[in-house]
Image (cartoon, rainbow, N blue to C red):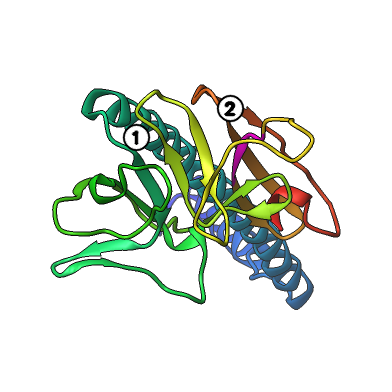
Amino acid sequence: MAEPGKVMLYARKRGMSAGCRSRQRGFTMVELLITIVLIGILTTIATSMMRDWAISNDVNATTAAVESAFDEARQAAISRGRPVVMRPGSFTSTGFTFDNSKGWEQGFVFFTNISDSDSTTFGTFDSGDEQLGVVQQPTRSRITVKNGSAVADMVIFLPNGMSGFVSTRNQFIQAEKNGKVKDVIVNICGRNGKDYYVKTLTVSSTGASSVNSKDSYGQATPPSECQ
């Protein structure tokens, strides 16, 4: 027969073990639903933040590429002594192509316009013209190029470094009728819901450029830069 003390100790341990098991239970349905809702909310917030970051990053990267292209185009015009044309489209194995249904949002190219060195007509990529560079179509942002309220079909840098745009009559224009010189305005706009991320590159008639930002949050309608 076991000693009385040992029997009592064994019984006490069994009782404690049974008590622990009786307190173990799973999640209730309400707790599971609350957990699922919280996970959904956190996932939505994280997804929105990631999208914001991706769009903002795309706007910044596109702006840097556009600014670099404009600087390079101006320097090329000066160093080569030829006009340099910037226009929407892309280079292919057979030359130059562009989508008529899209504007600058499809990306753009720039090249020396040797055949149009008389500074009266521009834009045709002919034999002898030199490819200088390409800015690819952005992934999450949109490029627009305007001169005043009008969309610029092309942007030109002259051999003296001056910049301007091309009208629908394919003529180089630097000034309005009232004598006020027009700047070339390049807007890079990204959108996430009602939040807009905008950077603007302003190119003066002298060819000098500057960048500024204008971000709008919770705006029901797109800012003018994104239209």
Please report the bounds of the magenta region as a residue range: 182-187
User: Toward the viewer: 161 or 118?
Assistant: 118
Amino acid type at mark 2: Ser
Which label sits on residue 73? Answer: 1
What secondary structure characterizes most of the magenta part? strand
Quarter of the picture containing the N terminus is bottom left
Q: Report the Cα–Cα distance between label 1 and label 2.
A: 14 Å
Q: Residue at x 51, y 76 (%)?
A: 101
The residue positioned farthest toward the right in the image shown: 220
Q: Give the labeled residue for mark 2.
A: 204
Residue 17 x, y percent position in the rendering? 56, 59
Of labels 1 and 2, earlier in sequence is 1
Residue 56 is left or right of residue 147, and the answer is left
Whether 19 is among the magenta residues is no
Residue at the location (49% across, 33% down)?
Answer: 163
Quick check: is 183 in the magenta stretch? yes
Mark identifier at residue 9 = none
Identify the residue at horizontal 13%, vertical 67% (top origin).
93
Q: Nearer the viewer, residue 67 or 170?
A: 170
Amino acid type indicated by mark 1: Ala
Q: Position of residue 121 (x, y in %)?
A: 41, 53
